[in-house]
Every structure is written in structure tokens, then in C-alpha cells.
Image (cartoon, grey):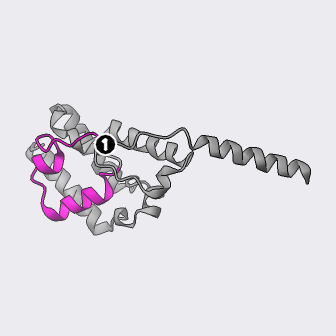
Amino acid sequence: MNTLKKVLFWALVVFALMQFISIDKVNKPVNTAVNFIDTKKTPEKIRGLIKGACYDCHSNETVYPKYAYVAPISWSVKSHVNEGREHLNFSVWGTYNKELKESMLSKSIQTIQSKAMPMPGYIVYHKEANLTDAERTLLVQYFEDMLKSKSY
């Protein structure tokens, strides 16, 4: 019993100390001149879907939930956001070259169709990101139309 108390004590101490290693939750300012939904004049319905299902991880408009303020969960959340922005950041869309835009649109179509995105773990805590099949079809069609018309 004494050993259990010591283990619990030290686990609590380590957990408390972990809280001092915080993540940067400050988003870079969004320039509407290069932001995807602004530059593409995205229709309101599509805009809502992209904002609700994609922007938290794939833009500079991340809204960190309350659980993202507790380490080590916060570290995982920040890692996912950083990785998402590396693959596609809608906030800097206008800075990407043609080939990169084509690639990102194609990959977005694939991940939406395969239901790899939004990530299932994200959907658990963000019901607005749980896209219906009809909403997925709408997003895919929007991105496919952009590819066909080369209006990216």
C-alpha cells in the first residue's frame, strides 16, 4: 500500500509539472487576400462545411477546445494541428503554386471520399465535423469542379 501511495504521489507530481510545458495556441492572422474561402468566393453552404470540418486543423483559424489546455493532451492536439497545416493550410491557399493546389484538391477529394478526413477521433468531440454522405458529396463536387475548370 505504501508503494502505491508513492507511485500515485510521483505520478501526480509529474502530471502537475507537465502543465508547465504549454503549447502555443496563438493563430497567425488570416489574410483574406490568400484565404481559400475568401479568394474562391465559396458558397455559404460549402463555406460552412469547410469551416466546420476542416478549418480547425487546416487553417490559421484553429479554435482550441478546453481539453487542449491540459498536457499531455494539448501536445497531441498541437501536433495534429501542425501536421494538418503542413498538408494543407486554407489560410495561405493563395500562396501555393498551381501544382500544389491541384495536388491538395485531389488529396482532399480522396480523403473525403474514403472518410479518412475529418479524422474519426476529431469527430467524436466535434459533431459539426461529422459530415453526412450528402455533405461529403457536395464538398467533393465543389473540389472536382475547381479541378475541372482549373479555377483554383
State the residue at coordinates (53%, 50%).
70
State the residue at coordinates (81%, 46%).
7
**Does residue 28 show up magenta in the picture?**
yes
Is disc 1 placed on a helix, strand or loop?
Answer: loop
Residue range (magenta): 27-56
In depth, the one of 42 and 82 nearer the eye is 82
**Does residue 69 show up magenta in the picture?**
no
The amino acid at mark 1 is Asn
Q: Position of residue 91 (x, y in %)?
A: 22, 43
State the residue at coordinates (41%, 39%).
24
In depth, the one of 144 and 73 nearer the eye is 73
Q: Which residue is mark 1?
A: 27
- Give the answer, above or below, for where 19 lies relative to 139: above
Placement of the N terminus among the 4 image quadrants: bottom right
Placement of the C terminus among the 4 image quadrants: top left
In depth, the one of 57 and 104 nearer the eye is 57
Kindly indicate the quadrant of the structure image that contains residue 139: bottom left
Left or right: residue 8 versus residue 101 is right
- Give the answer, above or below, for where 23 lies relative to 49: above
Q: Position of residue 8 (x, y in %)?
A: 78, 50
Q: Position of residue 125 (x, y in %)?
A: 45, 62
Left or right: residue 42 versus residue 90 is left
Callout 1 crowding tier (Cα within 10 Å): few <14, some 14–19, many ≥20? few
Identity of the residue furthest to the right in this view: 1
Q: Position of residue 58 (x, y in %)?
A: 31, 46
Left or right: residue 54 versus residue 102 is right
In depth, the one of 72 and 38 nearer the eye is 72
